[in-house]
Amino acid sequence: MILGSCVREKEVSELLRQGHWPHACTAELHAHVDGCRACRDLVLVAASFQKARAQAAGAAPLQSPGLLWWRAQLRRRNTAIERAARPLLGAQIFAFVVTLMAGAAILGWQVRQGFHFTTWLAELPRAIHLQALLTDLLPHLGGGLWLLVPALGALALVGTLAAFVASEKQ
Amino acid sequence: MRKPLPTPLESVLPILVAGDEPRVAQLPMDNDAFAGFYERSARFLWAYLARVSGDPALADDLMQESYVRFLCAARPESLASQGEVAGRKYLFRIGTNLLRDHWRRPQSASIEEIPEEFFAAAGDEGQSDSRAMLGPAMKLLRPRDRQLLWLVYAEGYSHREIAEITGLASASVRLLLFRARRKIAALLHAQATNQGRRP
Ligand SMILES: [Zn+2]
């Protein structure tokens, strides 16, 4: 028992809970509560809270339960979709990492075989006949080569975006 | 057999009412059962949230969120086996956690910033017995004390049930409640003395 509490508090609490206080109690208990500080406090506090509960409950603004039910349905569904999409994202990341590692391994192997990356890069325009391609293309562009670079950039961006949206939809 | 006509909400969200919904999207109660549960419990949950937080607008938000979380998290079989009393206790637990999260956020209003009229409004009916005016005394208690006192004296939960709702140890609940009750009783007595002195 906590110091300052009373052995009859449990009895008084039970009567308060059942709504039997003060009318359905013995005169002896009434006399005890009048003379016992702990029980008097208990009765005062319980009465105050029960009154406050009744008043606040009467002022409660209720909403449409149907709307809450639908919101819950929607949230549960979204959670399920998110949960299902999680392994898919994991697989995408895994595939990307594997591709990177394979690329690095091939490059390393090529370098060990005597492959010179800088020489290969310098030779690249000639290998794909870039000079011929540009001479053919330039007259059609009307000297607007500066348009070609941003256009290619935009194309790359749109392509990336389309790929992203497609993967999100999946 | 004739198919029932869809309600306006069902026509807005047809995909949600399709018969072949995955099991994961099933809620623990159907719409009608939930409406009944809501009617019987919402006023008291709102009273708890509003009087403990001292903020009716916050209580509106937290009440909505409590029911949505309740429906999302509760398992149909546990509700069926344990009944509405357990459902209501679970609902108060969610509300209690939401209140705690709100108080933990740095931007949340402290009790000192809440308009006094809200607490004072509770005394409108009880002017004849000024000792029963809870509002001003509640304002002077710590949030956790208000929570514990409300759960035991307004809702009638036992110490063990309050431990389940709040996540505190049963022994701590007992001790905290003893102190909180002593404090609020002293405040109520002081309030009555002040009221008696006024002309
Ligand atoms: Zn006593």
Image: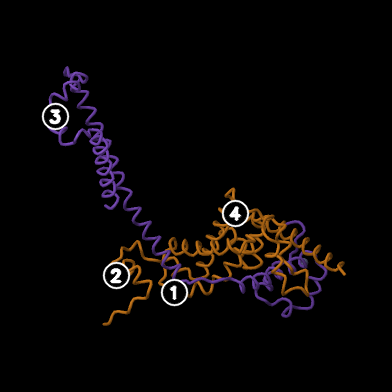
Chain colours: A purple, B orange
Q: Position of residue B79 (x, y in %)?
A: 45, 68
Could you tell which of marks 2 and 4 lies nearer the N-terminus? Answer: 2
The picture quadrant where one finds residue A75 is bottom left
Give amino acid for label 1.
Ala
What type is the residue that disc 3 sits on?
Answer: Thr
Chain under numbered label 4? B
A72 versus A98 height, above or below: below
Give the chain letter at badge 2.
B
Residue at image mark 4? B168
Residue receiving disc 1: B33
Q: Residues within 10 Å of mark 1 (few under 14, many from 20)?
A: few
Residue B80 sits in which quadrant? bottom left
Distance in Å between CA atoms under marks 1 and 3 = 77 Å
Question: Residue B101 in the image: x percent, y percent?
Answer: 55, 53
- Tell me whether marks 3 and 2 sit on the same chain: no
The mark lying in front, picked from 2 and 4, is: 2
Residue beneath disc 2: B19
Asked if the residue under mark 4 is in contact with the one under mark 3, i.e. CB atoms within 8 Å, the reply is: no
Q: Earlier in the sequence, mark 1 or mark 4?
A: 1
